[in-house]
Amino acid sequence: MFGAFIEHYAAHIADRSRPFPGLEAALDRLAGEGRRLAVCTNKLEWLSVRLLNTLKLTQHFARDLRQDTFGVMKPDPEILRQTILRAGGDPADAIMVGDSGTDVRTARAAKVPVIAVDFGYSEVPIETLQPDRLIGSFADLPAAVHALAASGR
């Protein structure tokens, strides 16, 4: 069944998927400020690449690294640490942006501050997980990144 699911998912990966409003502008702004961006996901590599390519988002990211790149999955902190390092970053200076409890737990385990969006895949209200910052729109992402970077957290 898993094989059939993956085949169907791959064939329809972006049928109804679109970038959230404000995402591309936020990514452009952050990249324009010299911030290096990477994707850390539990998706299989080839599916992640297909999705980013289909949505025309690939150019925004230095690296796109997934669970099959490192052999571990979120919330294991090693996947985030390795993603940061392979993208040319330093975990001590990194910030994770996520939409789920798994993302918050991964960031915490890696000792990386986390910005959570309140419109994602969380099974509980994301604010109950106490991310370092909570945003309701990607238009708010650059300001949240600046605030965390300035606070040293």
Image: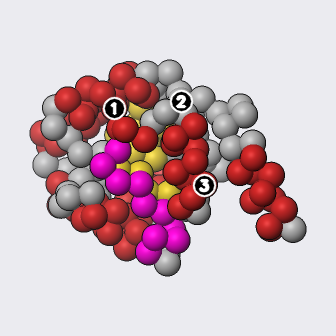
Q: Tell us which disc is closer to us: 1 or 3.
A: 3
Q: Are marks 2 and 3 in contact (CB under 8 Å)?
A: no
At horizontal 17% and vertical 54% (from top left) the residue drawn is 93
87 in the magenta segment: no
Q: Are marks 1 and 3 in contact (CB under 8 Å)?
A: no
What residue is pinned by disc 1? 27
Cα separation between marks 1 and 2: 11 Å
Instruction: Identify the magenta region.
Output: 61-70
What SS does tag 1 mark?
helix
Residue type, numbered disc 1:
Leu
Q: Which mark is residue 19?
A: 2
Q: Tell us which disc is closer to us: 2 or 3.
A: 3
Q: Earlier in the sequence, mark 1 or mark 2?
A: 2
Relative placement, left or right, of 16 versus 74 is: right
Q: Which mark is residue 61?
A: none
At horizontal 55% and vertical 34% (from top left) the residue drawn is 55
Residue type, numbered disc 2:
Pro
At horizontal 52% and vertical 71% (from top left) the residue drawn is 68
Residue 20 placed where, x, y %? 53, 27
At horizontal 27% and vertical 57% (from top left) the residue drawn is 87
Q: Observer-nearest residue: 120 or 25?
A: 25
What residue is pinned by disc 3? 47
Residue type, numbered disc 3:
Leu
